[in-house]
Each structure stands twice: as structure tokens, then as C-alpha cells.
Image: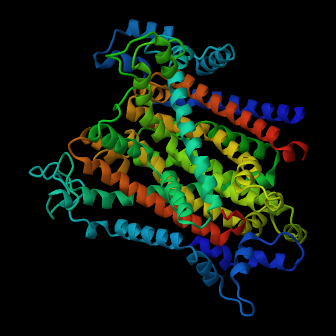
Amino acid sequence: MAEENAIDDPMPTAPERLLPGASGLSLSAAAVAEVEPVGEEPSPLRAFWSAFSENRGAVLGLAVVVFITLLALFAPWVAPHSPIEQFRQSVLLPPVWAGGNWTFPFGTDAVGRDVLSRLIYGARISLGIGLSVMVVSVALGIVLGLAAAFMRGIVEVVVMRVMDMVVAIPSLVLAILIVAVLGPSLTNTIVAVTVVYLPRYVRLVRAAALAELTKEYVIAAQVAGVGRLRLMFVTVLPNCLAPLIVQAALGISDAILEAAALGFLGLGAQPPTPEWGAMLADAREFIRSAPWIVTLPGLAILVTVVAINLMGDGLRDALDPKLRRS
Amino acid sequence: MFALILRRVALTVPTFVALMFVTFVAVRLVPGDPIEARTGERGIAPERLAQLRHELGLDQPVWRQFLDYVYGLLHGDFGTSIVTRTPVLHEFLILFPATLELAFCALVFAVVLGVPAGVLAAVKRGSVLDHSVMTVALAGYSMPIFWWGLLLIMFMSEYLGLTPVSGRMDLINYYFEPVTGFMLIDSLLSGEDGAFSAAAAHLVLPSIVLGTIPLAVIARMTRSSMLEVLGEDYVRTARAKGLSPLRVVGLHALRNALIPVVTVVGLQTGTLLAGAVLTETIFAWPGVGKWLIESISRRDYPALQGGIMLISAIVILVNLIVDMLYVAINPRIRHG
């Protein structure tokens, strides 16, 4: 629960509170201040929740994300069948609302696999990809971004030019190139998508860290003799977290979309893995005869991505009022 | 101003150098040999293999191949496709108009719908209209466009029979020599009855699919930028002067609100080119996106390498131009 830590930890904002006139009130502190009733001070967690729950869309998004996560976690117990078992006697069976039966509520695909079970197991894969990409790129983004901000010179030039180059190649084209080099697989999808989205995090962390570096509390820490690593990760980093968390949340949904696109092109998860994008690729030739195997996997992607984006928007509004859209 | 432009241009040089290096290395790392990919499983005589490798320069040391590659690039030589044996640049230039036409129509679709939708949502803030626009924008922004394309084909083409399923043109009924490479213009020039509407009909679905994400981004951006501008003092002054709401919104507010939107539109180039890969694959659209995917499966190193270089160069240049435009239309930055 990293997002709560940002405001759970009063330490980094404390030095700034000593400077009432300074413009450098940290973003997370501002979020807390906004919802604080006069007088008593609620716990940061509660303050965050009251800001977050103001946004009904965000709460709805969170609910859907929790639901999909639970489905993914408990897939073996929830799914009615195995995702790869082929029921040869019931091929291309329509879903229950289109004349199918309750054995296969969402129908079956071209080789008789249960669509509902494949969708449920697919949630594991899509969420897994989204989370892994997010965790790896945030971690690398923090290290590279802080290194660029603190070491300047050649390190900064090299890191930032490489990031510029990554950004110059259209995201999917670069992902395709990486997968072509490494070979199509689930792991390589994660690697490719991580590389594609890394620049956002590096740029964000560097910009935020550079902004913090000019502030008095950092200078005070330096004067007090804090070591460079401690300065980077303990003093400065917590104050860069709010925008990073927002970006990370929204980054999960982008990663899911990108991975599904690779799967659709046949460059992601390989058969018989029940990945949503790959399911759509298999379904292409059945547009006319079996619309449900085209419709349902895409709907699963759309609902998941919309829910994460709603949640991300809510996080941004609650954590980072300066970025608020309206 | 001039110094600013020079500095921005200079900054792209190392990016290009790194790009050359990375495309070169990455493409060398792609598993499988291009000659094997071409000869298939039957195999060929060792002498013939050596001769082919020599012809393609694959027997040279890698650093030599790289220098040759850079030298070629600087002379406008992006290599020769191993499969078709035509220069990559030539192939690219034949296919690029198809992608450009598609991307242009997609962008027109996105701007024509997105800007008014964003303005209306901002003006009627909090209304049902605002909420609907923002909901649709959220869905558009989150859309897996390859699925969206399949849905549209399923509904518009298969079910309603309104639009063609794939391709750029109905080649059985119409044939004419390409003049500009843009099907809409060429079909008009051909003078054949119905050719233009056939070309336009082929463009509808791909443009909608490719334009969906930019549409959502533009609508959201226009709305938030408009909301910001509507709160400014000069807008209040314009209202107080008794100007009609249409004039205040359309003339005074919109002009300033559009500044960030122009940037966003420009920065959609990368999104459009990435989206073109998927859109062209779904609709069998003969553009550079589909060509790039096919080059991978054919192990056509030079085509892949040259194609990625050219596409990236376009993205870098367009972003550079957008930067310049932004400076040009925003005096606050120019003089700041």
C-alpha cells in the first residue's frame, strides 16, 4: 500500500512545516491540509480516504478492480472449468443469453474451451503483467531518475538521451522490436512493455527530484551531513511520491493495453495461455459465426482498463491537488 | 528565439545517433537468419550460401556493417529489402501515403469531434452533457483499439453491410494508376464514377478506430484547458462588456484554450503511428505499420531497421515542429 505511505509518513513534510512562508509545501501535505477539519487532525489514511471517496467514479473503479483482483486470485475456485480443457462435443457453443446452457455460461470457443473460465484466468495474466511492469518500471525509474538528478553530468546526459530515444520510437513499434529480438512470450512481453514505459517514470522522478533539490530542507539535510544515498532515498524520494503513485496507477492500465495488443499480434502470450489479447486474435475468423468470442475478451480488457483509470484519476485528485483536472 | 530553435535541433542529434545504434544492434539480435528465412527448410549449397551472405554484406565484421549502415543513412540509403530487393526508402515512400492518409483522416475525425465536445463539456460544466462527454472520453481513452476495430467490422460491415471489411480500394471494380499515392485524391483524378465514394467508404472504419484515442485525449484536454481559461479575468471582462456568450467562448476563450490542445494534437503522432500498426493489421490496410509487422516475420532486417529509423525520424521531427509551433503561438514562452 505505497500510496498511503506517501502521506502516512509525516517525516518528509515536517521540515517544510517549519517554513510556513515557503512555497515548498509538499504535494501530499497539501492534500492532507485540504481535507483537514479545523482543530483535530485526522489520521493521514483517513484524510486520504475522505478525499478519495468524494469521487464516486474512483470508488466504483476501486470496487471493480478489487472484484477483478479477487477473481484473479481465486481463479481455480471461481472458474467453472479449466481454461485449457477442450470440450470437443460442445464447440462454439453460444452463451446462455443467446441460447446456450449453464454448463458454459459465456459459451465456448472454436476448440470447445469454456470462455468464462478463460476470461477469469486471463485476469490473472493481464493484472500480473500490469503489476509486474509497474513495479519494475517504478523501481528502475526511481533509481535512474534519482541518479540523473543527483549526479548530473555524463550520467544525466546518457540516461535522458536514451529515454528521449525510447520515446521517439512509437510505443508499440518498439515493443514489437523488443519481442522480435527476445522471442514472443509472456516474460518478454513484460520486458518490452517495461522498456516502453520506463521513460515516463525516469522523467517524472528526475523532474520532481530536481524541484525538491533547490528547497531548504534538502540543503539543511546536506549541511547536517546526510550521506548521498540517504539524501536520495530517504530525504528527497518521499516528496516525489505523490505524482509517481498517480503515474504508476495509470501506468498499469496502459501496460495491460499494450500487452493485450502484443498478444493480439501474436507476439505476446502463446497458446493455449488464456490471455485476453491472444483470445481476440484467435477469435478474428469467427466474427460472423461466433460474435461472443470476439466481444467478451475485449469487454474484459475495456472494463479492467476503465476501472483502473477511474481509480487512478481518483488517486490523482486525492494525492495531488495541483494536477486536478477541473 | 533563433538560439532556442538551434538548441532544440542540436538536442535531437544524439538521439538520432543512439537510434541508429539501437536499431542496428536490435535487428542483428533478432533470432533466425534472413537467408534461412528466405530459402526455407530445403536448405541450399554452402557455396551459394556464402555467395548470398557476401552479396548482403553479412560476412563483414559487425562494426564494418554498422559503419556502412551509418554511411548509407547519411546518404539517404536506408538499405535494400532482402525480400523484395527494392530500396527500403523506396518501399517506405510507396506505402507511407497510405498511412499518412489514414492518420490524417483519423486526426481530422478526432479534432472535429473532440474540440467541440470538449468546449461544450466545459461550458456546460457539471451537466449531463459534460458527464456523458467525459464518460465517452474515458472509454475511448481506455479502448483496446484492435477490439474496437473488430466490433465495428462486425456491426457496420458484417451486420449492416454499410462499409467494406478491409483494404483501401475496391480493386475489382476500379483500377487506376496511383498519381499522388493518396487514394482519395487519386480516385478523384481518375474520373471514374463512384471511385471516390468507394475510397472514402474504405477509410471510414479505419479512421474511426485510429482516431478514437486521440479523440478522447483531445476532448479531455480541450475541456480542462477551456475550464481554466473561462476562469480568467479577461473572459469575465469580455462577458461584462456584454459580448454574446458565443463570442466570448468562441473567440476570446477558445483561442487561448487551444494553445495546449495544439501541442497535444502534435504529440499524438507517435500514438497515431503506433495505432496504425494495429489498425492496418485489422483492416489489411497497405501502409507502413502492416509492412513493419510483415518484415519481422520475413526476417527482413534492412526493411525493419530502415522502417523503424524512418518512423522514429518522423516522430522526432514532428515533435520538434510542434515544439516550435508552441513557442511561436505562445508569446509567454517566446519572451519568457
Q: In this view, does B297 lie above or below B65?
A: below
Q: Can residue A240 be seen in this view?
A: yes
Q: Give the quarter of the image for residue B89.
A: top right
On screen, residue A302 versus residue A288, left or right, reads right
Which color scheme does this rendered protein use? Answer: rainbow
Quarter of the picture containing the N terminus of chain B is top right
Q: Give the quarter of the image for residue B311.
A: top right
User: Horizontal and vertical percent for residue A166?
Assistant: 62, 40
Number of marks in the rendered image: 0
Q: Is residue B119 above or below residue B76?
A: below
User: Horizontal and vertical percent for residue B159?
Assistant: 27, 41
Residue drawn at the location 77% of the way across and 71% of the way down: A26
On screen, residue A301 versus residue B105, left or right, reads left
Residue drawn at the location 28% of the way across and 38% of the way down: B158
User: Horizontal and vertical percent for residue B151?
Assistant: 35, 45
Q: In this view, does B265 lie above or below A319?
A: above
- Which residue extends farthest bottom? A39
User: Horizontal and vertical percent for residue B329?
Assistant: 80, 40
Residue drawn at the location 40% of the way across and 16% of the way down: B193
Residue drawn at the location 90% of the way across and 75% of the way down: A21
Q: Is residue A275 visible?
A: no
